[in-house]
Structures are given as C-alpha cells and as structure tokens.
Amino acid sequence: MNEQRCACNHCSCTVDANAFSHDGKAYCCEACASGHPHGEHCRMGDCGCGAATQPDEKSVDNALDETYPASDPISP
C-alpha cells in the first residue's frame, strides 16, 4: 500500500480519506493545511509540527535586536 505523506514540512503524518486539500496539496488536518498560524496542534498528538512552525520568543527577540540600527536613537 502506498501512503501519502502530509504536505506540511514539519509533519510526520500520512493523509487518509479525511485529508484536507489546499493549493493542490494534501494535508492530514486543517491545522496543517492552514500552516499552523497560531501554533495549533496537528491531529496526531505526538507529531509536534504545530510547535515546530512557530519561532520561539528568544529567536524573535534576537532578530529584533539584530535589525535595529545602532546609530538611531530610541524614540520616546
């Protein structure tokens, strides 16, 4: 039997008869099809692809620090 993998980059699930289709690709659940915009969990509790798609707070803070020009004063 040939199982098709979910099109979500971080997902390890396979799609079944209840698959969601988005832009011509098959996803295992609605959360994967929408791209986990708010870190929604996948249909499989042990998958973890929803958390993998969300940047952690430290990465966001670091990116902000690296993009703020050092020569510009902080505005009041």
Image (cartoon, grey):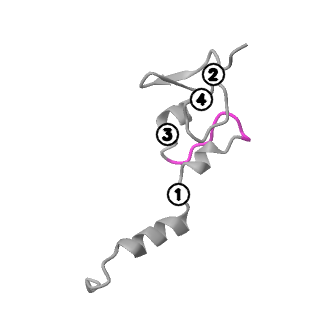
- Type of the residue with mark 2: Gln
Q: Mark 1 to mark 2: distance in Å? A: 27 Å
Counting from the top left corner in percent of width and height, residue 5 is at 63, 27
Q: Mark 1 to mark 4: distance in Å? A: 21 Å
Q: Is residue 6 above or below residue 76?
A: above
Q: Residues within 10 Å of mark 3 (few under 14, many from 20)?
A: some
Q: Secondary structure at mark 1?
A: loop
How many numbered marks, from 0 up?
Answer: 4
Q: Secondary structure at mark 4?
A: loop
- Type of the residue with mark 1: Pro
Q: Which residue is mark 2?
A: 4
Q: Secondary structure at mark 3?
A: loop
Q: Which mark is residue 24?
A: none
Q: Is residue 25 above or below residue 51?
A: above
Q: Which residue is mark 1?
A: 55
Query: Is residue 9 on the magenta stretch?
Result: no
Q: Look at discs 4 and 3 and give the one toward the viewer.
A: 4
Q: Is residue 14 left or right of residue 25?
A: right
Counting from the top left corner in percent of width and height, residue 6 is at 59, 29
Residue beneath the point at 41% across and 25% down: 23
- Type of the residue with mark 3: Gly
Q: Quadrant of the N terminus?
A: top right
Residue beneath the point at 56% across and 39% down: 9
Q: Which residue is mark 3?
A: 35
Q: Is residue 10 above or below residue 68?
A: above
Q: Which residue is mark 4?
A: 6
The magenta stretch is 38-46
